[in-house]
């Protein structure tokens, strides 16, 4: 009889290399969803004042209407909460009455349902089965449970019990970008990984009467939505088709800006503040340095910003205007961001996924030939998330 071959010694470094993917992480599919309740910006002030019994508050309706119609950059928004729901919860309008438990109960049921709708659309586009998903990253500003939305979402989608789950809470408008940054690391460091990112935002946690200075701004801008992205390296052709290669990802906290955007759970829901006077110029004043830090190591930094495609979180039209001016971008370079803001409002962290999907559509259907691009997310801190993207040849060809 022949002898059994001796085991070949394997080093830890060799094991580590075998565990890593060979290629760069890529966006393989995108799905989005909104609740059914749609309200036009022209009608919102009337609706809000009626529901909150605030028609008598001097000047409030006119100010809210002006922000909704003229300054928000939006034509309509979507909400999980309805007039009937608010009427059934008068505690939502009274700051002196605790309402957090009721709000969280509503969100606990609605967040995974909306996430599942967006995720199912991404899975169909992806072309593989839900059981092939190895990692799940869920982010929301509307939740504080364990087990949380990740567990319920996994059940709704039929994911395997071994799926590796991560929850991210209270990252504000930068949540989607932060989740995609994490997904890139997971995909590149786990051979064969397929990461489902689900970012879900519901404003039922912030709906209240006109009892604080920032209420009017929040009520005029924010809406509800969910975005889902499947991320993986080493695409399995011909089933998988990379839409965007995720070349690098970075995060910058601008010193001394911790007060600009704040969020905290309180007895009366999700509270916080936005210093709009400081916020608007912050992104424009710091974005050049963030872009240079991200692009220079790749040999791409030459200040030719118009040679890139752009997926920028549309916090407001003013923020987009300031970025456009600072980078001297040609008209239309931020068209994807402006369209999402116009048709959906600011959906906090999920907005950037909508923008990424709109940018993908434009590149495929309209033949935008840009090869390299940048995704920018903004959030509490003031935090800037920067991801450099590369569009494969087939994603830049007009159908």
Image: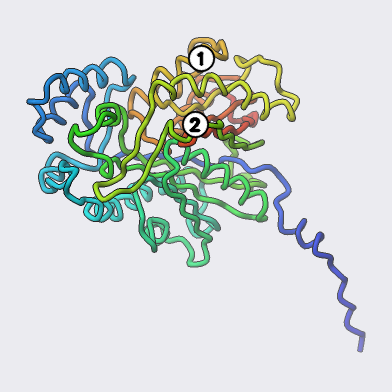
User: Can you tell which of label 1 and label 2 is closer to the viewer?
Assistant: 2
Q: Is residue 136 above or below residue 372?
A: below
Classify 131 as above or below 259. below
Residue 144 location (% of width, % of height): 36, 55
Going 43% across and 34% down the picture, which residue do you hit?
259
**Residue identifier under label 2:** 257
At label 2, counting other C-alpha atoms closer than 10 Å, the crowd grade (few under 14, some 14-19, many 20 or more) is: some
- Above or below residue 266? Residue 69 is above
Image point (15%, 43%), residue name: 94
Residue 162 place in picture, x, y as percent: 52, 66
Residue 116 to residue 6: above or below: above
Of residues 87 and 365, the one drawn nearer to the viewer in this rendering: 87
Does the image show residue 231? yes
Mark 1: secondary structure: helix
Q: Position of residue 141 (x, y in %)?
A: 38, 45
Q: Position of residue 184 (x, y in %)?
A: 61, 45
Residue in the image at 84% along x and 65% along y? 11
Q: Is residue 255 left or right of residue 106?
A: right
Residue at (26%, 19%) from the top-left corner?
Answer: 67
Quarter of the image with the N terminus in it? bottom right
Q: Secondary structure at mark 2?
A: loop
Q: Which residue is mark 1?
A: 324
Looking at the image, which residue sits at the far right?
2
Tag of residue 166 = none
């Amino acid at each position: 009889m022949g002898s059994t071959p001796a085991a070949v010694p394997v080093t830890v470094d060799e094991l580590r290399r075998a565990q890593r993917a060979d290629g760069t992480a890529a966006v393989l599919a995108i799905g989005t969803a909104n609740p059914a309740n749609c309200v036009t910006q022209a009608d919102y002030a009337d609706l809000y004042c009626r529901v909150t019994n605030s028609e008598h508050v001097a000047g409030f309706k006119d100010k809210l209407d002006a922000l909704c119609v003229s300054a928000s950059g939006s034509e309509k928004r979507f909400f999980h909460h309805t007039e009937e729901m608010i009427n059934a919860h008068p505690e939502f309008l009274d700051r002196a009455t605790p309402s957090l438990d009721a709000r969280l109960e509503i969100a606990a049921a609605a967040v995974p349902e909306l996430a599942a709708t967006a995720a199912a659309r991404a899975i169909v586009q992806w072309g593989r089965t839900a059981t092939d998903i190895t990692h799940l990253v869920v982010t929301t500003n509307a939740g504080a449970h364990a087990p949380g939305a990740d567990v319920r979402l996994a059940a709704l989608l039929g994911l395997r019990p071994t799926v590796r789950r991560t929850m991210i809470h209270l990252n504000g408008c930068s949540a989607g970008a932060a989740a995609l940054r994490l997904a890139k690391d997971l995909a590149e460091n786990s051979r064969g990984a397929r990461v489902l990112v689900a970012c879900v935002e519901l404003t039922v946690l912030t709906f209240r009467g006109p009892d604080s200075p920032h209420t009017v701004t929040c009520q005029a801008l924010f809406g509800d939505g969910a975005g889902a992205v499947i991320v993986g390296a080493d695409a399995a052709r011909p089933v998988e088709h990379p839409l965007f290669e995720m070349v690098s990802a970075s995060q910058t906290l601008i010193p001394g800006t911790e007060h600009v955007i704040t969020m905290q759970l309180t007895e009366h829901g999700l509270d916080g503040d936005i210093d709009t006077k400081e916020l608007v110029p912050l992104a424009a004043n710091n974005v050049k340095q963030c872009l240079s830090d991200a692009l220079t190591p790749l040999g791409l930094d030459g200040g030719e910003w118009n040679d890139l495609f752009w997926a920028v979180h549309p916090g407001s039209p003013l923020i987009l205007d300031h970025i456009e001016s600072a980078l001297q971008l040609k008209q239309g370079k931020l068209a994807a961001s402006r369209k999402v803001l116009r048709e959906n409002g600011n959906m906090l962290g999920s907005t950037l996924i909508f923008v990424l999907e709109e940018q993908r559509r434009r590149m495929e259907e309209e033949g935008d030939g840009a090869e390299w691009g940048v995704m920018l997310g903004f959030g509490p801190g003031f935090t800037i998330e920067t991801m450099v993207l590369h569009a494969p040849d087939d994603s830049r060809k007009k159908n």
